[in-house]
């Protein structure tokens, strides 16, 4: 019987390992790292066990997805467009899971994943693709990896307090393209808002300036339809990052096809419709309130006193939207950068070199103190 051949990869750079008789170790063809045979065998044994566990978890997740769809329907959402039937496309898919942060990623069979885009963990365990909900829509990546790297380098420029060691060692080339899951909500908001309106008139009478304020009871009512209100469905992605890189151009929204996946990862949702509802409701309510408020321009000011807004639920869609991501660590702290893969809008926190900060502070404070002292001498 033919034995199975295992191609071991370097844990540091994923390059191929080969055995070198002179050293008695496995050595990497690319980065030169060396490993004991027992060390690599133990690593791969752990990966196999993790892969088996990931496969079992995927089956359990598939059953959970079916139950959640039933729960959505019970809450009044129209889930007729949601399905877990990928058809023949499922044969060309594979799954990864991160043992560090729990991210579940899917991609086509030709895409290799070597680290987690959310937490930077270098070990992402391959598993069996099974049962996830199939997205309804996708916005394809419009900007390339080179565009993302250039944008991040530009983001670093002009930041005098940014530590030089951070820009030199934060693995900027490891930026990854990830399709982030979103729920999209359809429906209608209707209701009314009562305001206290004020009209202020200022005029002069002789030597006096007179201010007259007229008060009014103002009521505005109406309804507004909303379509595909987005709420990100990944707990690993900070909501403020996703809100900051919006909006996306929905004119480029496409029916989902796995043809858009090669070379990219796709995160599986782990935030349910019920958990996303509060954010979606808030957005829809704010849209109606904003529309009603814009009809009160004849008043100097309008203060809401009471509102009564009702939401009618419609269809819920599942979509994947493109994000270029880089997770990096510096001085024991995590930094996550996210860029809209369609528009190029980028957001991310940067560290501060406190040595530079105090140097700049001293450079400003010393001249200011000298000027203040000079002024005091003249008084």
Image: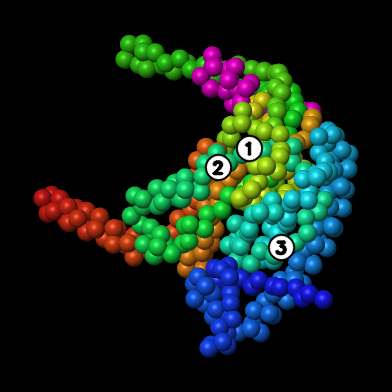
Considering the numbered disc 1 on the image, is that residue within a helix, a strand or a loop?
loop
- Give, as a single range, the part of the protein colored magenta: 290-313
**Distance between the Cα atoms at labels 3 and 1?**
26 Å
Q: Which residue is mark 2?
A: 341
Which residue is nearer to you in this view: 326 or 369?
326
Q: Position of residue 90 (x, y in %)?
A: 78, 49
The answer to which quarter of the image holds residue 357 is: bottom left
Q: Earlier in the sequence, mark 2 or mark 1?
A: 1
Give how far apart the Cα atoms at labels 2 and 3 are.
25 Å
Circles 2, 1 touching at the beta carbon (< 8 Å): yes
Q: Is residue 339 above or below residue 167?
A: above
The residue indicated by pointer 3 is 126
Residue 72 badge? none
Task: Residue 291: tell me if it is visible.
Answer: yes
Q: How is the image coloured?
A: rainbow
Q: Residue 139 got which mark? A: 1
Rendered residue at 64%/28% (across/down): 287
Q: Residue at x 83, y 36 (%)?
A: 79
């Amino acid at each position: 019987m033919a034995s199975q051949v295992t191609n071991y990869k370097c844990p540091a750079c994923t390059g191929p390992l080969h055995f070198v008789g002179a050293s008695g170790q496995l050595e990497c063809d690319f980065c030169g790292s060396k490993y004991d045979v027992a060390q690599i065998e133990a690593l791969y044994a752990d990966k196999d066990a993790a892969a088996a566990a990931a496969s079992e978890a995927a089956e359990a997740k598939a059953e959970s997805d079916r139950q959640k769809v039933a729960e959505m329907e019970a809450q009044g959402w129209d889930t007729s467009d949601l399905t877990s039937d990928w058809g023949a496309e499922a044969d060309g898919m594979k799954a990864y899971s991160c043992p560090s942060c729990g991210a579940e990623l899917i991609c086509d069979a030709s895409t290799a994943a070597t680290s987690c885009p959310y937490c930077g963990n270098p070990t992402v365990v391959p598993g069996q693709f099974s049962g996830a909900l199939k997205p309804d829509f996708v916005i394809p990546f419009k900007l390339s990896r080179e565009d993302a790297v250039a944008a991040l380098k530009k983001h670093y420029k002009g930041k005098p307090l940014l530590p030089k060691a951070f820009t030199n060692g934060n693995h900027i080339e490891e930026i990854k393209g990830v399709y982030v899951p979103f729920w999209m909500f359809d429906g209608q908001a209707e209701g009314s808002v009562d305001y206290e309106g004020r009209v202020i008139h200022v005029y002069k009478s002789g030597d006096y300036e007179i201010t007259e304020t007229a008060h009014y009871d103002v009521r505005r009512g109406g309804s507004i339809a909303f379509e595909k209100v987005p709420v990100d469905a990944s707990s690993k992605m900070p909501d403020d990052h996703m809100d900051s890189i919006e909006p996306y151009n929905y004119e480029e929204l496409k029916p989902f096809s796995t043809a858009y996946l090669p070379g990219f990862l796709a995160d599986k949702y782990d935030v349910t419709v019920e958990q996303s509802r509060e954010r979606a409701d808030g957005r829809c309510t704010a849209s109606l309130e904003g529309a009603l408020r814009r009809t009160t321009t004849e008043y100097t000011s309008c203060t809401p006193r009471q509102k009564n807004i009702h939401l009618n639920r419609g269809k819920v869609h599942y979509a994947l939207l493109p994000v270029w991501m880089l997770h990096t660590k510096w001085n024991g702290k995590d930094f996550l950068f996210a860029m809209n893969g369609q528009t190029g809008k980028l957001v991310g926190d940067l560290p501060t070199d406190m040595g530079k900060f105090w140097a700049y502070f001293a450079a400003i404070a010393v001249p200011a103190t000298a000027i203040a002292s000079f002024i005091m001498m003249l008084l």
